[in-house]
């Protein structure tokens, strides 16, 4: 029973998000998504259109996702890996290297980002 975790805001869900979650789930049997809370988004200098409870409803509905937990700060990853008995930590390749400190606790895998799609790009296009 391989347990996988990944982190993110997942605002305005798009196929890049879905492909990341699908590939993350394919690496194991159980996928935990740590979903950025609204206050943590502010820390990431990111605002989301959909608020946390709305994004949680959406991400929980995805077939690849088994559990959604709140991501409240940068420092919870080691305790999350221990608390949820995680075997594999997964992020998109825009984060390559950023979380290698987790390698002493679990496998760390960075998956290629899906090109040509981003929430911020979609919002920019809508505003034109
Ligand atoms: N992603 C992707 N392809 C895209 C866009 C996003 O593979 N075209 C991936 C990102 O690499 C990330 C996940 O989808 O793994 C969620 O993306 P965001 O919601 O933008 O997450 P981010 O703001 O990068 O938050 O502690 C880590 C942070 O919370 C990550």
Image (cartoon, helix red, strand yellow):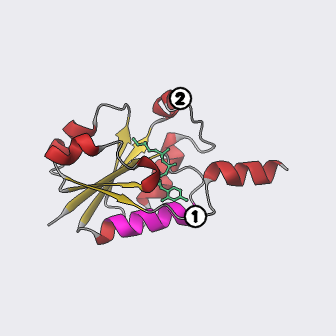
> Comparing marks 1 and 2, which lies closer to the viewer?
1
The answer to which image quadrant residue 71 occupies is top left
**Image coordinates for residue 5, horizontal then vertical, percent:** 29, 53
The answer to which image quadrant residue 98 occupies is top left
Identify the magenta region: 14-24
Q: Is mark 1 within 8 Å of ligand 1?
A: yes
- Residue sticking out furthest to the front: 97
Local secondary structure at mark 2:
helix
Give the crowd class for mark 2: few <14, some 14-19, many >=20 residues within 10 Å.
Answer: few
Q: Is residue 92 magenta?
A: no
- Residue sticking out furthest to the right: 128
- Check the image and report above or below for 60 versus 25: above
Say which residue label 2 marks. Answer: 42
Q: Left or right: 36 with respect to 86?
A: right
- Check the image and report above or below for 114 versus 38: below
Q: Is mark 2 within 8 Å of ligand 1?
A: no
**Image coordinates for residue 65, horizontal then vertical, percent:** 36, 62
Say which residue label 1 marks. Answer: 115
């Amino acid at each position: 029973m391989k347990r996988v975790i990944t982190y993110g805001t997942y605002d305005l869900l798009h196929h890049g998000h879905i492909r990341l979650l699908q590939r993350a789930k394919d690496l194991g049997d159980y996928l935990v998504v740590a979903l950025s809370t609204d206050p943590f988004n502010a820390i990431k200098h990111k605002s989301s259109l959909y608020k946390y409870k709305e994004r949680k409803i959406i991400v929980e509905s995805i077939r690849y996702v088994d559990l959604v937990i709140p991501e409240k700060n940068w420092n919870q990853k080691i305790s999350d890996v221990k608390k949820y008995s995680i075997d594999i930590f997964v992020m998109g390749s825009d984060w390559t290297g950023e979380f290698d400190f987790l390698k002493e606790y679990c496998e760390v895998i960075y998956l290629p980002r899906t090109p040509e799609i981003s929430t911020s790009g979609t919002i920019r296009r809508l505003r034109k």
